[in-house]
Amino acid sequence: MPGIDIDAPGSVQLLLGNEAIARGALEAGIGFAAAYPGTPSSEILETLARVAKKMNFHAEWSTNEMVAMEAAAGASFAGIPAISSMKQNGADVVSDFLVNVGMTGVGKGGLVAVIGDDPSAISSSNEQDSRWICKWMDMPLLEPSSAQEAKDMVKWAFELSRELDIVVVVRETTRLAHTRSNVKLGELVKTEKEAYFSDTWDMFQPAKSQFAAGPFGILHYQLQQRLAKAPAIFETSPFNYYVGPDKPELLIITSGVCWLYSTEAVERLGLQDRVGIFKLGTSWPLPEKLVEKQLGRTNEVLFVEEINPFIEGSVMELAASFPANKPHINFYGKRTGHVNLFGELNTDLVTDAVAKVVGITYQARDAKYDMELKEAAKMVPPRSINFCPGCPHRATYWAIKNALTLDGRNGVVAGDIGCYSMGFAAGGFFQERAMHCMGGGIGVANGLGNLKEFGFDQPVIAVAGDSTFYHACIPALINGVWNRANFIFLILDNSATAMTGFQPHPGVGVDATGEQAPAIDMEALCRSMGIKVEVCDPFDLKNTTETLVRLMADDEPGAKVVIMRRICELVRGRREKHAPYKMHVDPDKCVGDECGCNRLCIRLFACPGLMWDNKAGKAKIDEAQCTGCGVCSDICSQGAIIKEAA
Amino acid sequence: MKTLTKEPLNVIIGGVGGQGNVLMAFLVGSALLSKGYLAGVGDTYGTSQRGGPVASHVRISKEKQYSPLIASGHADVIVALEPVEALRLLNQFGNPDTVVITNSRPVYPPDVSSGKATYPEMDELSQAIRKFSAKAIIVNATDEALKMGGAIFTNVIMIGALIGADVLPLDRESMAAQLADRFHGTVLENDIKAVDKGIELVAG
């Protein structure tokens, strides 16, 4: 199977949107790539890191998105083309730096930011439309509709960035990121640039020889002047085009993958002769003349975009400036309720919107078949997400739950995002009661842990993963020590950034390219703050529970850290072929429904490796799922779940 | 099948997070690309990696690229690694002409194990799948995989079943070539055996 670095211009490959973006960066001759993992953007840096050594450029997983973007900017300042990719939350993290780098310009290298939005928050704690950042910070915005376009746009984004001396944003969404399609490759460009940070001082053009965000008044004006050159370039961009009859009844204005949904919806409704589609690839700033020309085709316009009415607002703003003698246009979209203001779109939703505006009805399949199938499908049980079989987090939350019960003061668990954020759901026994952004749990614990004056007596437990610890927890932990907040901070150390695909982090001793790297010792780091650190194995339920109960009862104020150390089961399973234990249920010992436990093992602990044998009325191990971690043998009051060394 | 019967031909490959539908869809898409078709593979995963329902949408065309997601009622073929997932997918994407190929081994959702929901009897489930599809092929891929040494072979056996069902312009040789591109030694040998087992299950 050819790698992403295949030197075969014109050949067609089946690439993920994210791989196509990586390829676009290679075709632009990047010299520097930095990111922090985050769905849906992770595969961009992963793909680049795989070929970085071979192609002689720098690729790194950075500790967080802010550092990644700053590092990429540093490279660009020294003349090296640089890319940083992130999910929508990453764009929020980076925003402070981005505002500033807008003022200073990006230097001669060229700086491209790829932001992966996650409509419907399929793999996120929140949904947001990151395109606003471009209006807010005066950055040009490109929205690819396909993997092919993503590749071509990223390559072009570097040229644009250098031409305008500006950060160019390429916005993808989960569907584009995670869809494989056919991409025709272009030529690879090898960077042979010399990195040099210019020190030619020109007092009349300080911004040209310095990267310092001040004096802001002039610099903001200059940024706006640079951005103002973009529309003229966008007017003739091949990424914007119209398909449809010359004078359609309805004009759809769309961007991103919504263009494909729109095209399919119109075909599905058989309206190709009545509805035209204007695809906007350069969404901000608007190529106003081109948009005005499209608006001239009809008086009925529907906007189809994910998530907010971003293009809708810009186009309506433009239309408001038209002379009064121009015919009135009816605009449909999110404002009128034809298109959802939240969530992912798809062909069905766009079909409904178009049908509604045009005034026709549409049924995807025969009404009788539809009704009967829906009735029959009621037998399909819901399938909620859960921790994987053998996941250390299940054991950790089990210990937390029992420890909080033993303590009896209704202790609070505040956490953040990662696999362990499922602690708020049944899989984590609903223990996590606050969950926001990366590092948010320990931040919140700083508040909860300093309410003694108000009679607050509930123990406070913060949880964060190991990768998250390095990403966003250290300032909050320092703050907790400094301001003498009372909390127990559990670092769930599974030796990987598990949620996003097991990328390495600063604690594991390996970098993005697989090279050996210094490992930052989290215990030593915490101890250097004067914190007493304990290490537990979550699979040792008894010791973990006792440790938590003891720490909650400890009257000595301040922050305490417990590292819950146990490797991610998916990583262990890949490294070691054999399970640690062979599990079985002893049918003589399992009392089944007669037991007072009320199916504790499958009802509460609920590891997918456990199942209920309805005929026997007893618990059973599902050998297709069980990973042999052995933890469930410690939760059965009858000792009926047996572990034998495998 | 040597050529496409529809433009585009819409195939959904689904199951439970972790069962391997993503790799299946990638292999199928790559094999189709090697035969000169345009193939799009949209993976709907995300957090459903952790035991939720997952599906890859494969769209095969001679002409152009289609959107990442198949519209409701527009699946021509549904391949499921788990039987209730077959009915779940049929409910959303099926139509009277849809062909369903499913593994018969249940993966019980947490709500079923805990007694909050019930899992249908296999007879009732397969009856419904047959009733609402043009053709249903139900194979016990997991048991065969366990016989071969692990549940991990289930998805490759189901690729064999898909080839055996003869509903795509896909053959054993082009799939074997895709596997040989990615795997070596005994892993490759076992995978090819698994493909053959799947073909055999459908033929048998």
Image (cartoon, grey):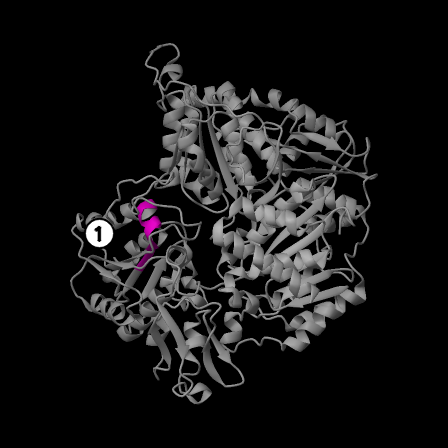
Circle 1 chain: A
| Residue A272 quadrant | top right
Q: Nearer the viewer, residue A315 or B194?
A: B194
Specify whether A430 is left or right of B66: left
| Residue B33 quadrant | top right
Residue A250 place in picture, x, y as percent: 78, 39
Q: Quadrant of the C terminus of chain A?
A: bottom left
Q: Furthest residue to the right?
A: A273
Specify whether B173 is left or right of A550: right
Q: How many marks?
A: 1
Q: Nearer the viewer, residue B161 or A449?
A: B161
Main SS, magenta region, reads helix
- Please tell me whether residue B63 is drawn above or below residue A531 in the rendered image: above
Which residue lies at the image location 56% right of the left edge and 75% below the top edge? B117
Which residue lies at the image location 49% right of the left edge and 64% below the top edge? B149
Start and end of the magenta stretch? A462-471
Q: Quadrant of the N terminus of chain A?
A: top right
Dot 1 amino acid type: Glu
Residue to which mark 1 is pinned:
A523
Residue at disc 1, secondary structure: helix
- Please tell me whether residue B7 is drawn above or below residue B101 in the rendered image: above
Residue A344 place in picture, x, y as percent: 60, 49
**Magenta span has A96?**
no
Which residue lies at the image location 67% right of the left edge and 57% below the top edge? B162
Residue A446 place in picture, x, y as percent: 28, 54
Q: Furthest residue to the bottom?
A: A594
Q: Nearer the viewer, residue B198 or B54?
A: B198
Specify whether A484 is left or right of A146: left
Residue B199 place in picture, x, y as percent: 66, 60
Q: Nearer the viewer, residue A101 or A382?
A: A382
Specify whether A420 is left or right of B176: left
Which residue lies at the image location 45% right of the left edge and 65% below the top edge? A425
